[in-house]
Image: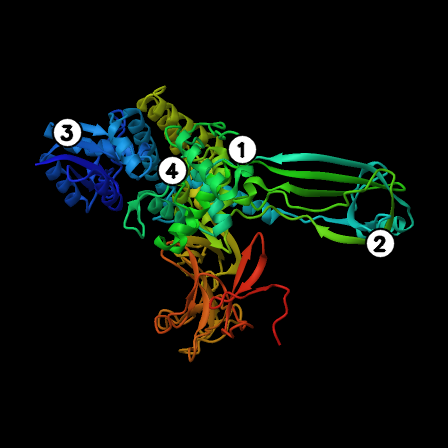
Amino acid sequence: MSQNLVIVESPSKAGTIRKYLGDEYKVLSTVGHIRDLPRTQLGVDLKEDFKPLYVTIPGKKKNVDALREAARNSMQIFIATDPDREGEAIGWHVMRLLKNLNKPIHRVMFFEITKTGVLEGMRNATTLDMNLVNAQQARRIIDRLVGFKVSPFLWRVLYSGLSAGRVQSVALRLICERQEEIDKFEPQEYWTIKTQVETEKKKAFEAELQKVDGKKAHIADENSALAIRHELKEENYSVAAVTKKRVKRNPHAPFTTSTMQQAAFQKLGFTTKRTMTLAQQLYEGITLKNGETTGLITYMRTDSTRVADSAIESARTQVEAKYGSKYLPAKGRPFGKSGGKIQDAHEAIRPANPDLVPDEIKASLTGPQAKLYELIWRRFVASQMAVAVFDQSSVDIKAGRFGLRASGSDLVFDGYRKVYFENVEEKESHLPSDIEKDDSLQLLKIDADQHFTKPPAPYTESSLVKILDKEGIGRPSTYANIISVVQTRNYVQSEKRKLYPTELGKVTNKLLVENFSELVNKTFTREMEENLDQVEEGNRTYLEVMKDFWAHLERWLEESSKSYTEIKKSLQEDSGEACEKCGKPMVIKWSKNGRFMACSGFPACKNARPLDAPTTEENGEPKAAEDHGKCEKCESPLILRDGRYGKFYACSAYPKCKFTKPFNILMPCPKPDCKGDISPRRSKRGRTFYGCTKYPDCDFVSWDPPIAQTCPACENPYMVAKSTKKKGDYALCPKCKHEITVNEPEAS
């Protein structure tokens, strides 16, 4: 009989922990959830205090049987599921399955999968926290009620298969509202005037016009700009004031889940989902080249910035050893709660052992794992380094009735920036150090530049995570799933790392906002998260929160059910065409395949066709709405259609001819002897990639948009388009990694 059984969630974690605990312990995994609400029915008894009906998840019976058998042959059982609400709920389900065996059951939590972390967790065994279980159960059932009660509303007015979610619908609303701002934006013209001036000692620097007649300069058009430019040419320039100050910049706190997702997107180009997958791998354990298996980071679902004293000391040792005592502050820098609800039982995300320097273990990791580990390591070590010091200066210049200003920033000591800094941080810009008030200046050059105000930028995964975190919508551990779900369901698509609502996403959001405005409201969603936090803390009960939410949802459902016919009609658009069969107006409607045109005389007239399909001539031949070319198989006109994944060309003779081709062709396929074209496609998970139209005969594929440009370095027949904040738009050779900026001329 095995003496002890330890139950975790992940098989890979089980293998790591087994090595630390030895032969006295058997370690098994649940492989995630083992019980949940049934898939095909509500599974919640609304009349019996929202009692849930849990069933074993299909395919998990073998796991359950294995756990029972192992528990039956053990003296003690230790539930070591993840240290958060969801992990507590999984542990509760395990306990309910095993409690009739009458074996001692303990709860242990591993905040890092290292030998020290595991042994410490075993020494501090406790019991399951039912407040956490109830908070997670309330979240699960509230989400189930929204899914099962609100989604049918979308089925009735649009088509079946659509889904609404308590948090995902708010995220969709944010994306749609941002797109509306962009679409409605009207750019405003303005001009700036910059001068290059020189001191008496021949030191040149740039200054920009700030004031005209003592008021803030606002130059609306070219005539005004040229008039001011002409006037400035005739003025004498002198220094009106010089301001200098020393500024210190503190390092950033170690990562939380949210800040890690944002930084990994900005610096590494990782999606939130990929970041969390890699972090899970680093947490659960990696086998190093010396044969040791260990977790490399602490638990990656946290909104706390707290760090253990022992970890601070370990980081300080690393700083002094690698960078010298001048980079080490006099004492460790503590971090902690900065506002809002945090899971302070967790530390920030940090290296489990800061002595494992990224370069030394790089060979044991995959490329993406190594990049993320280095990012986490650098952020943590930098958090315990000395402040960065800048000398900031500004020079105010008088030129007649005009005031100009020049600003400079000189790095005195890099401090923590030697290891880590954000791209948006202060950059160096130099002004003459010996410039003084009343110094005369000589005008060298003056430029007037036209600009236009820009609309707000579309959300990226990083900026969406930031606003979700700021507004308290959902929890950081759910952000990756939220962003993945809205793309998988074709409500949102990602293009060049920016998130755009699809037509389906826009109309779904419109319906939810008009009929469930409170449900998809940021304030209501934030307050719901606060209510769940209250359950976790024991200040509210599960039943109180459920009754309060159901009272709201019942009212919203009743109000929305009164006007299905009117709502469906409101979605119809006038096509501006007449039905070729009966003469009545054609209208645009929605179906599961997107929008289509139908006769307004339905059901008397059942004429319908795809949105961009041609009408017919009197002789029955298709009349082309626009010339899209001929079908390559039967020579019939091609028509433009809307499909699940966007627009595409199809043969007008369908269903007799099923020829299709992509709407957006980027370039001919670069593979030798291939006559296909490269076009955007969508993966099963909703991510855009670029492949050959001759697939499966041709297997060309690229995650980045290919460009029909030969690499000047290695003559690879194509390059790919890339874009970062730091470099802007540029072309990259996927073979030799040569880069070309957008404005760089090709090699002759």
Looking at the rendering, in which quadrant would you find the N terminus?
top left
From the viewer's side, name the closer residue of 204 and 605: 204
- The three-letter code of the residue at mark 2 reads Leu
Indicate left or right for 676 with 139 as reference: right
- The three-letter code of the residue at mark 3 reads Lys
Residue 301 - label: 4
Residue 99 - label: 3
From the viewer's side, name the closer residue of 412 and 300: 412
**Distance CA(mark 2)–CA(mark 3):** 85 Å
Q: Residue 432, percent across and down?
A: 77, 45
Foreground tag (4 vs 2): 2
Looking at the rendering, in which quadrant would you find the C terminus?
bottom right
Mark closest to the chain's N terminus, 1 or 4: 4
Vertical side of 735 occupied by 466: above or below: above
Residue 329 - label: 1
- The three-letter code of the residue at mark 4 reads Arg
- Characterize the local packing of mark 3: few (<14), some (14-19) or many (20 or more) Cα atoms within 10 angstroms: few
Contact between labelled residues 2 and 4, with CB atoms less than 8 Å apart = no
Q: Residue 667, percent across and down?
A: 50, 71
Quadrant in the rendering for residue 682: bottom left
Contact between labelled residues 3 and 1, with CB atoms less than 8 Å apart = no
Mark closest to the chain's N terminus, 2 or 3: 3
**Distance CA(mark 1)–CA(mark 4):** 29 Å
From the viewer's side, name the closer residue of 539 and 27: 27
Quadrant in the rendering for residue 82: top left
Indicate left or right for 431 with 292 as reference: right
